[in-house]
Image: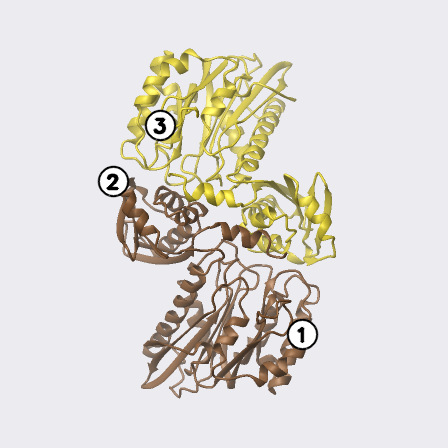
Chain colours: A yellow, B brown
């Protein structure tokens, strides 16, 4: 398996585009994205567990009931959530897209991201769709990835090539997400496409399994969004024997999927609102997976750990504190902690107590852009990784006046 | 019942003092506090649920096994937590205090607060104790409250006068706490004294019941500390008939206790690290108490809500989002939200959807120092309040270089 270019257009038969249609006042920021498969694809999605769900998610869920989709329409600048006519607007967006492409409305995945509780005006979308559809191309992955950005500072896309039964398959994805990131069964918006042949139930199974160790282990600010959704469209154009059960092919598919999602998680966490550093917490030596995941996620969610990382301060006591209150059953007298980055690795805590270390070397390690917090629980063989970022002045700035 | 002066010395027979003994380098900041009862008092405490527990908590727990205490010794500047010799040092602190006062070591409540994982040097404490004990007085409540501060910007103390069976009783308390505030069965350090006569089991019952709606509903940053502890000493000098069961007297005692603790919660939240505003979230119309508490606490813990409050931004969508992911079983289509402060009240959301409101008036209301977020769930008669603060540049600054 190898990383390739092309994002959501890397797989055969997929085209995409992104334009500014006028939902945002800033005309230099694209706000409408379209992804299209030349034939109907098997599809599945996972949605936020937030009880407040964006209207587009409810409409998409209904559309994917038959396990089929052929297009994704997504606007940024307005979440179409907590609005009285949200469902109606999301359905209208789907219908307009379907009419433009000559497909059925229930083969459209519809998504919105941006501010909550402001009515979404469908007019700019209606007016922009002809141009958007006319510009669909295999080179449109960048434009689409840019059009779904909100406070993101970089567009997030990735693709891989892999083999299934001797056939070359490709899978690519794009994501948006920078704040309100604390996914639970999904994350902000993620769209993945592949030309591998795989049944809709197996797509659902693959996604559900994958997110446990990827998007559900990522957090920027502990706030689970109302509009989280990850969707995967598989159009089968690679010509492999359709995957309909677990086995070697499904395992290869899962490996490709996990490469895509892990990559996107790292990009989302590293581009967290205001972030200056990507923080990875790797917990090893756990008695079971639940303990490993709970402890790792508690560390990357701690405001105090996040602020210490911003200050490049090796304040490991806060890491122990976060493990201690995580709810995971841990013997704190067996916990070891070390920091690692491109500049090296430094142990700071052994058996739950501090050890002598050079503050200067620790500072040098922690000043890097990507930091690993290594936690060993000394209690078993299970491991998990969680992704987050530091807490900075800019996070406060971005969220202190998001709407103004 | 009325508020009075005197803090932990308001009740008969209690004296206190606070000095700089040298744990901190900054000689202008006191770092050692002592509270003394002229006779042994019935006592109880509640401790952090963090699995990582400060050594002083373990020693205090052993000392309070007999339900008696006569003194509290507390240093700031070092938490004496995650150190190999922590227990030994905490026991030494108790013994030195007991020797100085001529009481038993197991009648000493010992506490420490400050940085985790650095060895606590007991020498400055040993050297300072004679001066500390010699200065004990009924006017020493301020000095003691100041000596337990860490990043707190104001000392936190309160006292009330109330009656039990015709006898005038007094109760007073002091607290420290500004960061790592997300108590679970207790908060940072809180010491409460009373001259009411009440048995040790009833003190324990009163505390356990009270903290559910006070300290456990307070959060600054979502981080449950390793050194949380709230203790209550009752020396019985008011001469009331000892409370040994539930009834009218216990209810009056609970009311006094709740007044003290609620006051301290508001002070802790309002003085949260870097905070510019105290945020109170009042949830009404809940189907049960658990829903009310869970929803209220989720709102005041949301980084996005906290940042919006810093920016005086009426971004109510984030409040709905926080209720939605709280885990509480809520019908989001029935939720109403309003903001209130000394400048007035403004409804912003009705039945889960936005309503027209004046952004100018909302901004004026939210620019106040104390903000109430009023949430009505429209689903029953239960209510709960949670206390928190805004998320600011200064929180990041304080915690980005706490140790340096």
The answer to whether residue A150 is seen in the rendering is: yes
Quadrant in which residue B59 is drawn: bottom right
Work out whether A400 lies above or below A203.
Answer: below
Q: Is residue A364 left or right of residue A278?
A: right
> Label 3, on which residue?
A59
> Label 2, on which residue?
B356
Q: Mark 3 lies on which chain?
A: A
Mark sitting earlier along the chain (2/1): 1
Question: Looking at the picture, how far across and down is residue B261, in whole percent?
Answer: 41, 68
Which of the two residues, A62 or B345, is positioned nearer the viewer here? B345
Taking the spot 56% from the left edge, 12% from the top edge, the residue there is A239
Callout 1 secondary element: helix
Q: Quadrant of the C terminus of chain B?
A: bottom right
Quadrant in which residue B356 is drawn: top left
Query: Marks 2/1: CA distance?
Result: 62 Å
Work out whether B378 lies above or below A245.
Answer: below
Mark 3 vs mark 1: give the one in front: 1
Which of the two residues, B359 or B240, is positioned nearer the viewer here? B359
Query: Marks 3/1: CA distance?
Result: 67 Å
Callout 2 secondary element: loop
Callout 3 secondary element: helix
Taking the spot 49% from the left edge, 41% from the top edge, the residue there is A182
Q: Residues within 10 Å of mark 1 (few under 14, many from 20)?
A: some
Question: Looking at the picture, how far across and down is residue A315, in whole percent?
Answer: 63, 53
Q: Which mark is residue B230?
A: none
Work out whether A82 lies above or below A34.
Answer: below
């Amino acid at each position: 398996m190898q990383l390739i270019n092309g994002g959501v257009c890397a797989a055969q038969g997929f085209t995409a585009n992104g334009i500014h249609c006028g939902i945002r006042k800033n005309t230099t920021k694209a706000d409408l994205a379209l992804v299209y498969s030349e034939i109907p694809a098997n599809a599945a999605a996972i949605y936020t567990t937030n009880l407040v769900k964006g209207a587009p998610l409810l409409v998409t869920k209904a559309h994917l009931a038959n396990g089929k989709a052929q297009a994704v329409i997504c606007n940024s600048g307005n979440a179409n959530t907590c609005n009285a006519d949200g469902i109606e607007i999301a359905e209208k967006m789907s219908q307009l897209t379907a009419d433009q492409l000559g497909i059925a409305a229930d083969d459209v995945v519809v998504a919105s991201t941006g501010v909550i509780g402001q009515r979404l005006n469908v007019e700019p979308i209606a007016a922009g769709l002809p141009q958007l559809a006319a510009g669909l191309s295999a080179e449109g992955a960048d434009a689409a990835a840019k059009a779904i950005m909100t406070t993101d500072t970089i567009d997030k896309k990735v693709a891989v090539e892999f083999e299934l039964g001797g056939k070359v398959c490709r899978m690519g994805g794009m994501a948006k997400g920078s704040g309100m990131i604390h996914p639970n069964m999904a994350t902000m918006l993620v769209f993945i496409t592949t030309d591998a042949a795989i049944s809709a139930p197996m797509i659902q199974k693959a996604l559900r399994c994958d997110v446990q160790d990827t998007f559900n282990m990522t957090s920027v600010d502990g706030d689970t969004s109302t509009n989280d959704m990850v969707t995967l469209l598989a159009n089968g154009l690679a010509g492999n024997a359709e995957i309909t059960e677990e086995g070697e092919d499904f395992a290869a598919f899962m490996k490709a999927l996990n490469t895509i999602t892990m990559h996107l998680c790292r990009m989302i966490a590293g581009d967290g609102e205001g972030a200056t550093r990507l923080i990875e917490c790797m917990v090893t030596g756990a008695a079971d997976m639940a303990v490993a995941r709970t402890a790792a996620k508690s560390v990357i969610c701690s405001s105090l750990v996040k602020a210490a990382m911003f200050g490049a301060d090796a304040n490991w006591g806060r890491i122990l504190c976060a493990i201690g209150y995580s709810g995971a059953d841990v013997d704190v007298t067996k916990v070891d902690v070390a920091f690692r980055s491109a500049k090296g690795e430094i142990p700071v805590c052994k058996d739950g107590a501090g050890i002598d270390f050079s503050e200067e070397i620790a500072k040098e390690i922690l000043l890097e852009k990507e930091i690993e917090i290594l936690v060993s629980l000394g209690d078993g063989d299970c491991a998990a990784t969680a992704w987050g970022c530091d807490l900075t002045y800019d996070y406060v700035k971005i969220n202190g006046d998001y709407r103004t």
